[in-house]
Image: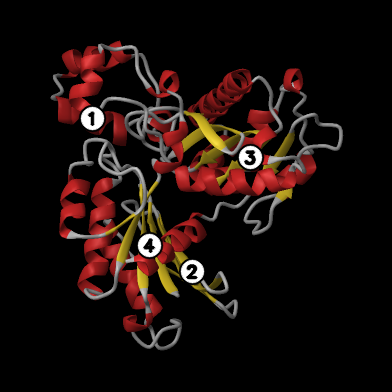
Amino acid sequence: MYVLVVNAGSSSLKYQLMDTATSKVLAKGICERIGIDGLIEHKKEDGSKTSREIPMPNHSVAMKIVVDTLTDPEIGCLKDMSQIEAVGHRVVHGGPYFFESCLITPEVLEKLELCRDFAPLHTGPHLMGIRGCTEVMPNVPQVLVFDTAFHQTMPDYAYMYPIPYEMYEKYHIRRYGAHGTSHRFVSIEMAKLLNKPVEQTKIITCHIGNGSSISAVQGGKCIDTSMGFTPLDGVEMGTRCGSIDPAIVTYIMKKEGFTPDEMSNFMNKKCGFLGVSGVSSDSRDIEEGIKNGNKRCLLAASILAYQIKKYIGAYAAAMNGLDAVVFTAGMGENNPELRERVCRDMDLFGIKIDCELNAKTWRQPNIVEISTPDSKVKVFVIPTNEELMIAKDTENLVKKS
């Protein structure tokens, strides 16, 4: 089955056209820096690549550019979109309404609209991408695959918050997590490399990108994750603050005169790397700033590394052991400096990395072990493949329908 997989993030949009019968990627690409300037990188099955800068003010425009690229007579791989048999969409948050993948219907889209409060940065872009695809391919079945699904195995003491239980019953306030499709994929791949039964594995997966989350995966199941009720929780991100003292929220609202919506926008779009550095939300700009002696860029990068380090320690304690740490996603795969900062001075856990090999590991399509032979805990860089997970789920649902 030919499946077009659409993975819209907060500032990026990945796409792959896959043949699920062979798991072969016919074409793939990424739209980056959406809302900043815009860049599309496209690669065909034969290895030919094209890259062009083009304004992408929002995800709707990016989706149209993807469609035009796939059907372009010179650089595309399709005569027309009718060759696509199904479309699979990555969706960050299913809220209390979705706990597994599902086919898109008008009723499903109505419920997805209700998830805006749970993922304000993502649900809008998801809906724009979905509607853009629906307009172009109205008769092609489309499937939603939710990032929150993998985290449904968390025990109640991990997903519940210490607030009145009525708030959970009335408003569904609990930890949901995110990036579950990515955590699921890399944890499966890591388990294969440990040469032990999956049931005995203890793995920490670090999905670090413009949006970031850490997960504890024990016995192949997620037992805890850093993102919470929304993707705002957890570690510092590109424009998101991550976990902060809740009292800071009301304090700033009073001092600045912010409404709830303005405060939400502030925490989601004005904080993180952007807010701390005053330079950019993009880690590449942050690392460049560090090289040029910008102390605030160094502070922004150091905050993130320190927070990841703390999560590794906490999750190792929660699992009563640790076999491996995995770095994945944009920064996890392509920012050696971040990985070195995180793994430095982790002797207590027996974590040691080969700094020379680590420095050379970026834009690497293969799985790479960056830990030293004597490291008690294995450290791997595993390129995520959310698209493959989404394509398989899409195929299964379409065949059942």
Q: Give me the residue at 52% from left, 43% from top.
A: 183
The numbered disc on residue 28 is 2
Q: Which of marks 1 and 4 is nearer the N terminus?
A: 1
Mark 1: amino acid: Ser
Looking at the figure, which quarter contains the N terminus? Answer: bottom left
Residue identifier under label 1? 264
For label 1, the SS is helix
For marks 1 and 3, give the CA distance.
Answer: 31 Å
Residue 122, relative to residue 232: is it above or below? Answer: below
Residue identifier under label 4? 397
Question: Mark 2 and mark 4 in contact (Cβ < 8 Å)?
Answer: no
Percent coordinates x, y for residue 13 in the rendering: 39, 58
Percent coordinates x, y for residue 285 in the rendering: 49, 44
Tell which tag, 4 or 3, sits nearer the viewer: 4
Report whether residue 255 is seen.
Answer: yes
Percent coordinates x, y for residue 103 in the rendering: 29, 60
Q: Earlier in the sequence, mark 2 or mark 3?
A: 2
For marks 1 and 2, give the CA distance.
Answer: 34 Å
Given residues 218 and 310, the one toward you in this image is 218
Mark 3: amino acid: Val
Given residues 126 and 303, the one toward you in this image is 126
Residue identifier under label 3? 326
